[in-house]
Image (spheres, grey):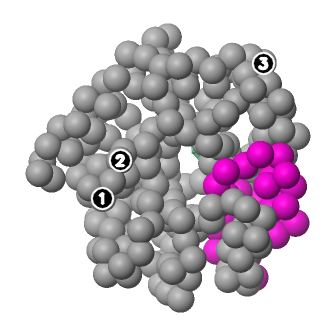
């Protein structure tokens, strides 16, 4: 059983106080900072680019930064995010002409590559590329906005991806993103996820430590179920 990792999405943070918000969730027990890059082209929203990632590193953030590119095209941003301090970089196959090339660019830049599947993206996008992936990110909402409802069919899709990972024999993280809350994180973990992005569920609370502890308690119950 792999360790469960919690990755607050800064999309839901108070961006006027981003450095302090990131410090606060890390002090509250988060493992990773999830960094949503939206371009008003691949998705109908616009967020932040490499200079904000660099600003977090300059501010002193040492935790891994998990960059989720919701952009089209993909390749031109990979090196800039690597230079800006990204640890992981993931992208959507629909936004990219040559998936293997983009994955290889991420590896060559020194970052850990991930492929993102939308709720309706077929699993065959994973064929012939899993051996190169560090993580697979399943979107449990349609990408572009925080604060949406978890799509329940994502649980079945998670189980299917988990099977593919196990059959592949590779050590690939399975990340889930969208609508993750205290009251569903246990069933999401039991379906196979081991990395959990949560935006509004964390940043909309006044006590980050309390909500992260509650998520960890739910994850411990899921873990006990595996044993
Ligand atoms: O990538 C996205 C949305 O496109 C996510 O990372 C959201 O930011 C998650 O937000 P919540 O659903 O947890 O509020």
Disc 1: which residue: 192
Task: Residue 203: give x, y in percent of width and height.
Answer: 54, 23
Dividing the picture into quadrants, the one containing residue 109 is bottom right
Earlier-in-chain disc, 2 versus 3: 2
Disc 2: which residue: 3
Q: Residue at x 55, y 25 (%)?
A: 26
Q: Residues within 10 Å of mark 1 (few under 14, many from 20)?
A: many
Which dot marks residue 16?
Answer: 3
Q: Is residue 175 left or right of residue 159?
A: right
Q: Which residues are magenta?
A: 68-97
**Label 3's element?**
helix
Q: Residue furthest bottom?
A: 128
The N terminus - image quarter = bottom left
Which quadrant of the frame does ligand 1 lie within? top right
The residue lying toward the viewer, choosing from 110 and 121, is 110
The residue lying toward the viewer, choosing from 115 and 156, is 115
Q: Residues within 10 Å of mark 3 (few under 14, many from 20)?
A: few
**Label 2's element?**
loop
Earlier-in-chain disc, 2 versus 1: 2
Vertical comparison of 153 with 57: above or below = below
Q: Residue at x 45, y 78 (%)?
A: 123
Task: Residue 24: give x, y in percent of width and height.
Answer: 58, 17
Q: CA distance from mark 2 to mark 1?
A: 12 Å
Q: Is residue 78 rendered magenta in the image?
A: yes
Q: Residue at x 41, y 75 (%)?
A: 170
Mark 2 or 1: the one toward you = 2
Earlier-in-chain disc, 1 versus 3: 3
Vertical comparison of 56 with 159: above or below = above
Q: Residue at x 72, y 67 (%)?
A: 106
Are the residues flagged by discs 2 and 1 in contact, CB closer than 8 Å?
no
**Label 1's element?**
loop
């Amino acid at each position: 059983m792999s360790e469960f990792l919690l990755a607050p999405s800064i999309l839901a943070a108070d961006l006027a106080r981003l450095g302090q918000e990131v410090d606060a969730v890390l002090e509250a027990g988060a493992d990773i900072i999830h960094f949503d890059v939206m371009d008003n082209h691949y998705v109908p929203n616009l967020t932040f680019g490499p200079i904000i990632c660099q600003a977090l590193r300059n501010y002193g953030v040492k935790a891994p930064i998990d960059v989720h590119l919701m952009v089209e095209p993909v390749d031109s941003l990979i090196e800039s995010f690597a230079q800006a301090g990204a640890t992981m970089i993931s992208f959507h196959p629909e936004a990219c002409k040559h998936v293997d090339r983009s994955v290889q660019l991420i590896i060559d830049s020194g970052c850990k590559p991930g492929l993102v599947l939308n709720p309706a993206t077929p699993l065959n996008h994973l064929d012939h590329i899993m051996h190169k992936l560090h993580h697979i990110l399943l979107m449990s909402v349609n990408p572009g906005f925080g604060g949406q409802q978890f799509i329940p069919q994502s649980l079945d899709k998670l189980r299917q991806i988990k099977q593919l990972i196990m059959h592949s024999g590779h050590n690939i993280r399975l990340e889930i993103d969208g609508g993750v809350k205290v009251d569903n994180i246990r069933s999401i973990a039991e379906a196979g996820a081991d990395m959990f992005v949560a935006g509004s569920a964390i940043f909309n609370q006044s006590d980050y430590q309390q909500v992260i502890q509650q998520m960890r308690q739910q994850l411990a119950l899921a873990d006990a179920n595996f044993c």
